[in-house]
Amino acid sequence: MKPDWLIKPLPQGERLVEVGRVLSRLRLHTVCQSALCPNLGECFSRRTATFMIMGNICTRNCRFCAVEKGKPTPLDPDEPARIAAAAQELQLLHVVVTSVTRDDLPDGGADHFARTIAAIREVNPKATVEVLIPDFRGSPAAIEVVVRARPDIINHNLETIPRLYGQVRPRADYQRSLEILRAVKELNQAIWTKSGMMLGLGETNEEVLEVMKDLRRVDCDLLTLGQYLSPSSEHLPVTRFIHPDEFGELAAQGRKLGFGGVASGPFVRSSYRADELLRRREEF
């Protein structure tokens, strides 16, 4: 049974319906829908969504994620323009774009990210752009392609502690993910970097703190911490529900470590209210 603080009313309203219609008409995917995010109703009601490019089928088999796994479809060359059109129609001031992992592509989809960023900039040059990227199998060339497109924020989630990587992210590597964040800063110090973790998979708070320190060692600017919720009985189970006060304590520790912005709470996800976390960083 979920504790009381994880019971969330379902928002309703015309804005929620409007976002769904725009996404359907433009044939776009969102991580909100594909990952069964508990914040979908709230975010759609605020006329925000996290676009998911390169299809909705992932080549990885992470055991926490609800996104479908298997053989993905070919890239759609018109997708970047449709993402830009949706962002313009929804009047987004902060556009968040993520993707499935595409290990089948030579560049992991880095060029598709770059073209999507360029398309958004073309129709709405005043909007800030945040991308949540996969690890591109650690390719420095792929990372550089995304950095050259100059998004405002590059996010790459560590997701969990090193000890649990084999269980939670069997085809990912903790050090490789850290090096991606380091590489972004080395290529362009002006781009803000961001990472996030899910809690409740069997980690200790001491281990979480060590990950936070590792992130600061690679000059990561922004941090998100949220409660892991198992999408189904086939996914990893929740080992513990973290109380909101504990999330608050972790946020305070993060600020002491020097993060420019920390979002920490049961319903926090890597792109949840990303515009607000950006404003906190701007004020830092």
Image (tube, helix red, strand yellow):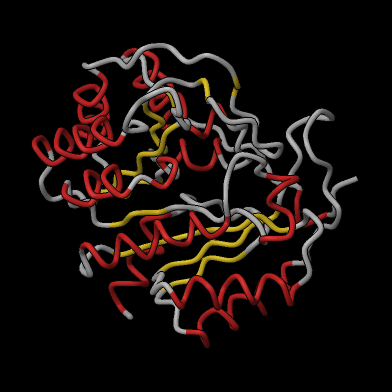
- Between 139 and 127, the residue placed more toward the observer is 139
Where residue 204 appears, x then y in whole percent?
Answer: 78, 69
Give the residue at x 71% y 45%.
Answer: 168
Would you identify the image quadrant in which residue 51 lies?
Answer: top left
- Between 15 and 222, the residue placed more toward the observer is 222
Left or right position of 77 against 273: left
Relative to residue 163, is residue 167 depicted above or below?
above
Residue projecting furthest to the bottom: 256
Where residue 15 appears, x then y in whole percent?
Answer: 41, 32
Give the residue at x 39% y 25%.
Answer: 18
- Between 232 and 206, the residue placed more toward the observer is 206
Relative to residue 238, is residue 208 depicted above or below?
below
Task: Name the quarter where the C terminus is drawn.
Answer: bottom left
- Between 272 and 225, the residue placed more toward the observer is 225
Relative to residue 182, is residue 152 depicted above or below?
above
Relative to residue 66, is residue 38 depicted above or below?
below
Give the residue at x 37% y 65%.
Answer: 182
Left or right position of 23 against 62: left
Left or right position of 263 against 229: left
Where residue 74 appears, x then y in whole percent?
Answer: 36, 12
Left or right position of 3 against 75: right
Give the residue at x 47% y 30%.
Answer: 100
Where residue 49 appears, x then y in whole percent?
Answer: 41, 37
Task: Name the quarter where the N terminus is drawn.
Answer: top right
Residue projecting furthest to the right: 1
